[in-house]
Image (cartoon, rainbow, N blue to C red):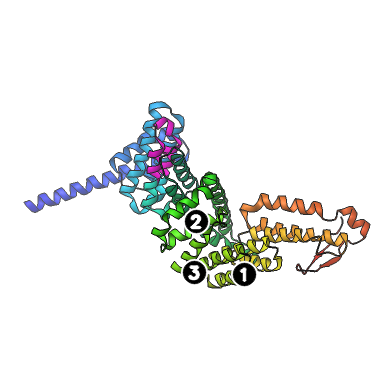
């Protein structure tokens, strides 16, 4: 008898489960079709039924629910708007409970914080509350906290708290380094992916439709991270001047003189803010090189030697740094940094070698092309024998600038402005016609040691 009762109970439960599954699928199909048609009001009730009764039935409950609630938030005001905002945050929490593997903590935590930040007035949220929200999401899962807007908001809140006297300068600088390192890591990630596609195109192989879409996606993220990098540097601005940095690093040096991470950040910050004339900079560089000798430390030793006018020794250290670096992306950045120093010192030929190395290692960074173009333009008067040939150097410069625009989505406007500037200084069509040199190849000497073909006249 007991066996029959048990079998009947199991059958009953099975029928109920089957009915529940069928009901959930039916209502899910209903609200999903409404969402596809962007009829969010009609989708709301069947969606809420499935959400409340079968929260772990299907991920669409959360992906569609996000769109439904975003529409409600946009169309509502006052208490209703607050309720919908809070419900969307709750929805993301429920998604994490029911689909943890598909709900990265950093990504969705930052998303919730950003929503609250953008509605901070109606929610009556303080800067401290919002900062704590972002900070918790960042520390919970840094790997997936990648949204450029949220990274910028996170740091902007730190700046506001510093300005209000609620955060010390040391914490401000540390957070800037954290966010900068994150932006650099994401830039490296997308640059590596984009480089593969650029190299495929350069080999003469057309990208597939899917690869073309990925290329646009990578380029859009690189543009966003470039803007964020400039934005957070602008926010830090005068707050990180030598008058602020030197006392802080002097005070904390003894405690951190063997802390490689602290030393790297201190040296980098003082270098970027041009605090290198202070004796502390050299002290920090030497300590950094002793604590963790690397390509990075050799580079900074080179900057100290260069500052002390020991150029030959400095260049030797730069080469050591370059040879020591094994990571392709970091090696490319290092080559570019060395090139910029040599360019500033007027060592154009050596600088160009490093810039070209940077380009071969990281093809999607167009900045080295613009640096080479700038050096060509600066050498126009010294690398041509006649007025026409001197001005022909600007065609070479324009060609380099065009390459920057072709490979680097963040350099498009800058490169276009450079091309226009160089072309305005090169011989005009009428001058080409008068000189009778259309189509002629001009050999350019001195350190440039290249040639340029005079444009034909149509």
Residue 315 — which label?
1
Q: Nearer the viewer, residue 254 or 30?
A: 254
Residue 115 — which label?
none
Extent of the magenta region: 111-134
In the rendered image, residue 80, in percent from the top left (x then y), is placed at 38, 28
Q: Earlier in the sequence, mark 2 or mark 1?
A: 2
Q: Is residue 79 left or right of residue 443?
A: left
Q: Of helix, strand and loop, which one carries label 3?
A: loop
Majority SS type along the magenta span:
helix
Q: Residues within 10 Å of mark 3 (few under 14, many from 20)?
A: some
Residue 294 — which label?
3
Circles 2 and 1, Cβ within 8 Å, touching? The answer is no
Q: Nearer the viewer, residue 332 or 203?
A: 332
Q: Is residue 270 above or below residue 440?
A: above
Residues at marks 2 and 3, CA–CA distance in whole angstroms: 23 Å
Which residue corresponds to mark 2?
A: 186
Q: Is residue 260 above or below residue 138?
A: below
Q: Of helix, strand and loop, which one carries label 2?
A: helix
């Amino acid at each position: 008898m007991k066996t029959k009762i048990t079998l009947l109970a199991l059958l009953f439960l099975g029928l109920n489960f089957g009915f529940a599954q069928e009901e959930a699928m039916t209502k899910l199909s209903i609200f999903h079709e409404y969402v596809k048609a962007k009829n969010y009001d009609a989708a709301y009730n069947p969606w809420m039924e499935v959400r409340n009764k079968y929260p772990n039935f299907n991920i669409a409950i959360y992906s569609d629910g996000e769109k439904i609630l975003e529409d409600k938030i946009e169309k509502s005001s006052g208490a209703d708007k607050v309720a919908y905002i809070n419900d969307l945050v709750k929805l993301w929490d429920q998604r994490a409970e029911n689909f943890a593997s598909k709900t990265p903590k950093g990504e969705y935590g930052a998303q919730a914080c950003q929503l609250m930040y953008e509605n901070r007035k109606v929610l009556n949220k303080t800067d401290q509350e919002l900062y704590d929200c972002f900070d918790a999401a960042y520390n919970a899962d840094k790997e997936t906290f990648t949204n450029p807007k949220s990274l910028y908001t996170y740091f902007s809140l730190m700046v506001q708290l510093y300005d209000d006297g609620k955060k010390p300068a040391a914490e401000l600088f540390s957070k800037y380094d954290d966010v900068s390192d994150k932006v650099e890591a994401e830039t490296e990630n997308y640059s590596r992916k984009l480089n593969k596609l650029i190299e495929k195109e350069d080999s003469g192989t057309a990208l597939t439709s899917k690869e073309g879409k990925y290329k646009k996606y990578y380029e859009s993220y690189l543009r966003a991270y470039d803007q964020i990098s400039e934005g957070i540097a602008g926010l830090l601005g005068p707050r990180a001047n030598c008058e602020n940095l030197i006392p802080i690093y002097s005070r904390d040096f003894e405690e951190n003189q063997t802390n490689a991470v602290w030393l790297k950040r201190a040296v980098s910050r003082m270098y970027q803010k041009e605090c290198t004339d202070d004796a502390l900079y050299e002290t920090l560089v030497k300590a950094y090189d002793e604590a963790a000798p690397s390509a990075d430390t050799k580079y900074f030793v080179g900057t100290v030697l260069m500052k002390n006018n020991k150029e030959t020794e400095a260049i030797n250290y730069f080469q050591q740094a370059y040879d020591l670096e094994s990571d392709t992306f970091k090696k490319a950045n290092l080559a570019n940094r060395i090139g910029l120093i040599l360019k500033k010192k007027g060592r154009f030929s050596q600088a160009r070698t490093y810039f070209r190395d940077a380009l071969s290692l990281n093809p999607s960074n167009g900045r080295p092309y613009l640096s080479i173009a700038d050096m060509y333009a600066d050498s126009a008067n010294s690398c041509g024998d006649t007025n026409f040939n001197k001005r022909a150097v600007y065609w070479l410069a324009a060609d380099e600038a065009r390459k920057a625009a072709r490979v680097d989505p963040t350099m498009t406007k800058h490169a276009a402005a450079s091309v226009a500037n160089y072309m305005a200084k090169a011989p005009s069509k009428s001058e080409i016609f008068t000189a009778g040199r259309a189509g002629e190849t001009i050999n350019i000497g001195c350190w440039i040691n290249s040639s340029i073909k005079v444009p034909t006249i149509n």
